[in-house]
Each structure stands twice: as C-alpha cells, then as structure tokens.
Amino acid sequence: MVTRTYTVAFEGVEARDVEVQCAITPGMPAFSLVGLPDKAVSEARDRVRTALSSMAIALPSKRITINLSPADMPKEGSHFDLPIALALLAALEIIPSDAVECTCSLGELSLDGSLIPVIGALPAAMAAAREDRTLLCPKASGAEAAWVGAARVIGAGSLSDVVRHYTGQAPLSPSEPGEVIADVSGRCLRDVKGQERAKRAMEIAAAGRHHLIMVGTPGSGKSMLAARLPGILPPLTAPEALETSMIHSLAGLLDEGGINRTRPFREPHHTASMAAIVGGGRRASPGEISLAHNGVLFMDEFLEFPRTVLETLRQPIETGTVMVARANAHVKYPCRFMLVAAANPCKCGYLTDPARACSRAPVCGEDYMGRISGPLMDRFDLRIEVPPVAFTDLDLPASGDSSATVAARVSAARDVQAERFAAHPETLLNADAEGEVLDRVAAPDAEGRTLINKVAERFGLTARGYHRVLRVARTIADLDGSDAVLRRHVAEAVSYRLSSAADS
C-alpha cells in the first residue's frame, strides 16, 4: 500500500504542490528518498528515524521508499521532514492514512521529535487554501500561516503531538494569527533644521511613490531626511501586507508570526553584491529590491555602489518585477519599491560648498556623477540638491510640519489615487500610470501643456522624462487637492526634474 500526504516546494514567492508517497515493501532493509532531493532533504532519513526512535517507534526490517512527486522538480530545504514522517507513520498504520491525505505539512524535525520552525509558512498556507487542505506546521510558524484566513492551520510542538492529534487522543486547536507588530518611529521631520525644499520633495515622493535622488555635501542631512521617510508613509494595506510578508517569510524575516504593517525600509551598504541587491545565490533567494517591495529602498553613498549593481536596477524600476536567472532556477520576485538615493556631488564631497571649494572643480564632479548612466538618471522622478545647513540655523527652534501632519497629507493623496485607479488593478499609484491611463488622469491645462512642451524642447527631455514630469505633477495636484493638473503643478514638477545638482 502506498500512503500519500502533501507539502510544497518554493519557486520564488510561489509554493508548488509536492506529493509525498511512502511504500513499505519486502526486501533488504533500506530507507530510500527519491525525487531530486538536495542534501538537506536526503538527511531527513536520519532525522525521521531518530525522531521516531525517541517515541519508541521502530522501523520494520523492510524496504522503505519515499518518493517526492513530481520527480523532475528539485526539492530543497529541511521542511520536508514532517511530511516524510507523516507519510511513514500512515504507512505503519499508526495514524489514519485518509487524514494525512488531506493535509499539507512542513516542518523540520529535531532528533528528540520536536518541531523546528521553517521559512515559507505563509506561502505554504496559501497553497494549502488553494487545494482545500489543512496546513500542519511547527507551533512557532502557526501564527504566521494563520494570517491566510481561507486556510485551516494547525501548529504542533512535536511529532508526538501530531500522533496524538491524528489518533484522537489530544486534538490540536487551530492556530491564531500573530499580533501585528507596531513599529512606531520616534524620528520626526521637525528634527531636520532647514532643508524645506528637500522635505517637500520627500512628501511628493511618498505620496506618489516616485524615485528620488538627493545630492549634497557631507553632513547636509541627506541620510537624516531619508531616515524620517518611514514616518510619513501610510501603513500597508491588508493585501500589501500579505504580499510583502510572503517575501519576508521566504527570507526568514518574520518573527513568531508577527506581520508588520509598517512599510519596509531597506538600506543596504554600498559594498553589497549584485546577488544581495537583486537576488540570487544557490537558492535564488530574494534580494534587497524584493525585500523593499511596497516600501523604500534607500541607497546611501549611491555612487559608491559598483556600476554593474546600479545598472541592474533599471529594469526592475520600470517593470516592478525581477527575474533571478540561475543555472538551476529561474525565479520571479515582485519589487515595486520607491528608490531613494543619496550621493555627494564629487569624490571629496565639497564641489557645491563655496566655503570649501573642491580643488578639482568641475572635473571632479563630472567624473564622479558620470558613474550614473543617463538611462538610470532618467528614471529618477525627483532630483534635488541638499545644501549645507548654516550653523546659525542649527540653533533655531524646530520648524515646519511634523511627520504626523505630512503623513496625513500623504495618506489623503494616496486615498485619492486608490479611488482613481480602482478600475485598473495593475496601476496602484501615480508612479504606475502609463499610456492611456496617464493621458487621461495627468493631462495638464492649456498653460501647463505649453510650459511642459517648452521645457521638453529647450532641455531635451526624453519621452520617459516627459511622462515622469506628468506623473509628478499629478501627485502635486493630489497633494494640493486639485482635480486638474495646473500650470503651477507642472512648474514645480519641472523644477525637480531639472535640478542642477544631480546633473552637474
């Protein structure tokens, strides 16, 4: 008799069904695992055998074969331990086979039979709900998986708990979703003295998810401004939280099932490799751009990143997805993020500081800023100069709007966009609008049209740059509470596009 149960194998954020089959047949005693298992899956034999031995369950002196179907799909990870043990227990008639056949399970077994949490419980729960199966997982992963309301999730502390559950001795109760983590930042925009233009640009960027680059001398407040960006972003919506948490689950970044409604804010160091930024490695894991999905990717010292790394950002910025192609895997991850870059104007950093003029100006700045290719620079909607702050300004009291006030305006603007694009699910914010949708929602008035045409002709805007100006103008109009895109909205959008600092 062949017993069956189910688990999943991960391909990006997708969880593909895997049928675990177990057959005990006469022959030389052996325990075989087939179906393209990797080293971690192959070692499950010893973990399962020892865990069963700790429960005083001895394996028969027969040939045990475990098949992981489909056999041509690679199986990776230690989460196959529990489904293998379930199929084996059903074959030994210790637990009913019909019960495990409607179960999808994942979990790593300790040698004493306890269950160790594994990554990917959230996408596994979605796969189980899709096939109308119960998900069985380690207790520590149950709160995470329970966020999928359509799935029935059972968390167990050990293999003996699983046996008692299926034999009716001590049924396990369904897991409850973990508490949402409240990540309240105490950093406020009012802490930043001066830099009103930079604050305004950040508000516009946050409202429409526009890409922003800040160029300024060392110590002018670029990193300080970026650190306060999470405080003005609205919380993740329920679908966004689930989508983002699936990626974080595969990366092992969810703690005890807590799903964070705060938008991701990733800030990789400039020594990060291409695989760390874009994704990759042996298992084609998600990179920083995917971990920043629905949030912010802040790249400080932008020009110090390797040029090959910077150029790989061009396609994900446009498409919102990234294909991680390796010899043994082709995996697609979502990466709809807001890129915020900070850079010095030249190698020494003081090209634009009249008090400490760069000795190699303007060649130093031209060479340094030349590390950003034209196509990549063209993808930044907002380009601003962050000048040094005068010492006298540092002694002034805090001024300007607080983060809470700015966040309210940003949230209101995003609500307007959500209503505007309700009939276009592929377009979430102004930054996503293109084609006919962009022409309809961002068409400026006659004066605005005349202005942008003059700017495009005078400064040689590309078609991409032209459309990005319209998107930014639409966001400025939303913040202004205006249904129409007026000349003043276009003028402000153009002023950020033609910043001399970023083009020097």
Image (cartoon, grey):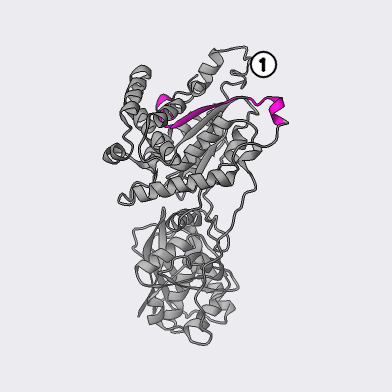
Local secondary structure at mark 1: helix
Camera-side residue of 343 and 481: 481
Percent x, y for residue 214?
A: 54, 30
401, 140: nearer the viewer: 401
Magenta region: which residues?
373-394
> Where is residue 401 shown, x and y percent of the image?
59, 40
**Quadrant including the N terminus:** bottom left
Q: Can you tell which quarter of the image residue 363 is in? A: top right
Q: Position of residue 402 (x, y in %)?
A: 60, 43
Residue 387 belongs to the span the image colors magenta:
yes
Q: What residue is rendered at 46% in x and 36% in y?
A: 211
Res. 287 in view: no
Q: What is the residue that sits farthest to the bottom in this orientation? A: 169
Q: Is residue 219 above or below residue 172?
A: above
Question: Which image quadrant is residue 159 in?
Answer: bottom right
Q: How many marks?
A: 1
Magenta segment includes 416: no
Q: Amino acid at mark 1?
A: Ala
| Residue 73: x %, y % from top left | 36, 58
- The residue at the far left in this view is 436
Q: Quadrant of residue 375?
A: top left
Find disc 1 in the rendering and name its residue. Answer: 355
Q: Is residue 78 visible?
A: yes
Is residue 49 placed above or below 223 in the rendered structure?
below
